[in-house]
Image (cartoon, helix red, strand yellow):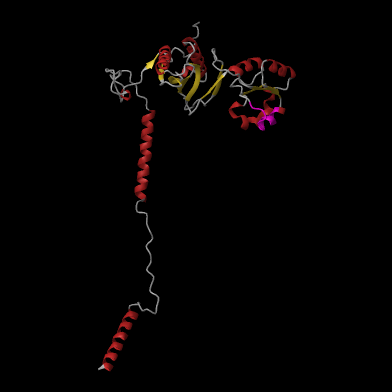
């Protein structure tokens, strides 16, 4: 009986091995490698569509921002509740910001200082937004300008370097208060930071010998457009020693200090008039207003929009012959 059982087991084992070999799954052989599936990006098309939709949305928003809506004959401003609030308490974002006369805005800033008990000798700032467009899709390049204010508020005098190799010009420069006077020998000292100044002026003949300073001085490098190149050394020193410098930032904005709050209203108006007229001189008047909006504020008060029509230069009409 035991012999029959052993023979039966051998038969079953042989049948099992033959079946495994026929199916290719014998334990003595390496099993066939199943090819792996390569991962496929299933959402590539969806992402490209989303990207196109985002670009179209950005272009649409850009067009909306650039579009100027004329509210002249409208019963209320576009996107706002009304021209003026009726109640004493209201949400400011639902109404256009009030625009005051310059004298009224300055008086309000002085009143704010008294009510807030802040320091009276604080600076006044103006924020101007410019229309940089010219004819034929051209634009005004961002500029830096220095202007002599009628009522200076600076306590210290600017340091000015005068480049000249003429002995007489050097003598005149020293007599008029130049901090440093010299020729090409000053170039290396400036590169080594041995000489530092607020402004640099030069006579026209020496400019070719100062080209190595362009990368060092950058916007302070003498230029005829800025009035820092010329032969009238006393006039240039008078301007740059006590002059006020401002520049265009972020393509079309000017933010500069223009007076002190404790100055009289007339003095503040004179400084404001000088700066606005100098700004308008950087674009032809026949192209329309150069300044789109103007804001005035002190160091501790809110900003107030003010009217600039009284400060804008007028086009001189030619006499009819």
Displayed quadrant of residue 210: top right
Residue 135 in view, yes or no: no
Q: Residue furthest left?
A: 1
> Any magenta on residue 121?
no
For the point 69% across and 24% down, the residue is: 206
Which contiguous range is marked in magenta? 186-196
- The answer to whether residue 8 is above or below residue 149 is below
- Residue 2 is left or right of residue 121, and the answer is left
Q: Residue furthest top?
A: 321
Residue 23 in view, yes or no: yes
Residue 41 in picture, x, y percent from top left = 37, 54
- Residue 65 is left or right of residue 161, and the answer is left
Displayed quadrant of residue 70: top left
- The answer to whether residue 3 is above or below residue 41 is below
Q: Residue furthest front?
A: 117
Residue 264 in picture, x, y percent from top left = 48, 10
Residue 217 in picture, x, y percent from top left = 61, 29
> Any magenta on residue 189?
yes
For the point 44% across and 12% down, the residue is: 310
Residue 204 in picture, x, y percent from top left = 67, 22
Q: How many marks?
A: 0
**Nearest to the observer: residue 67 or residue 110:** 110
- Residue 280 is left or right of residue 186, and the answer is left
**Nearest to the observer: residue 160 or residue 215:** 160
For the point 31% across and 85% down, the residue is: 13
Displayed quadrant of residue 54: top left
Quarter of the N terminus within the rendering: bottom left
């Amino acid at each position: 009986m035991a012999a029959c059982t052993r023979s039966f087991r051998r038969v079953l084992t042989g049948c099992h091995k033959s079946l495994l070999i026929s199916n290719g799954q014998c334990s003595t052989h390496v099993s066939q490698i199943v090819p792996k599936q390569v991962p496929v990006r299933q959402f590539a098309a969806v992402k490209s569509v989303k990207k196109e939709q985002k670009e179209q949305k950005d272009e649409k928003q850009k067009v909306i921002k650039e579009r100027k809506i004329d509210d002249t004959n409208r019963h209320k401003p576009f996107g706002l509740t009304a021209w003026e609030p009726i109640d004493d308490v209201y949400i400011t974002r639902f109404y256009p910001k009030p625009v005051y006369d310059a004298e009224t805005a300055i008086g309000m800033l002085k009143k704010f200082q008294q009510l807030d008990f802040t320091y009276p000798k604080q600076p006044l700032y103006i924020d101007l937004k410019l229309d940089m467009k010219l004819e034929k899709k051209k634009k005004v390049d961002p500029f830096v300008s220095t202007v002599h204010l009628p009522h200076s508020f600076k306590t210290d005098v600017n340091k000015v370097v005068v480049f000249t190799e003429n002995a007489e010009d050097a003598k005149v420069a020293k007599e008029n208060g130049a901090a440093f006077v010299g020729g090409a020998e000053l170039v290396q000292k400036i590169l080594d930071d041995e000489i530092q100044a607020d402004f640099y002026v030069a006579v026209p003949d020496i400019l070719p010998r100062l080209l190595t300073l362009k990368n060092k001085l950058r916007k302070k490098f003498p230029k005829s457009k800025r009035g820092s190149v010329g032969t009238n050394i006393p006039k240039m020193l008078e301007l740059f020693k006590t002059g006020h410098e401002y520049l265009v930032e972020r393509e079309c904005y000017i933010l500069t200090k223009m007076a002190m709050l404790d100055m009289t209203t007339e003095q503040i108006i004179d400084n404001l008039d000088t700066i606005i007229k100098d700004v308008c001189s950087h674009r032809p008047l026949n192209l329309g207003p150069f300044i789109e909006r103007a804001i005035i504020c002190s160091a501790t008060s809110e900003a107030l929009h003010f009217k600039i029509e009284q400060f804008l230069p007028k086009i001189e009409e030619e006499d009819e012959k």
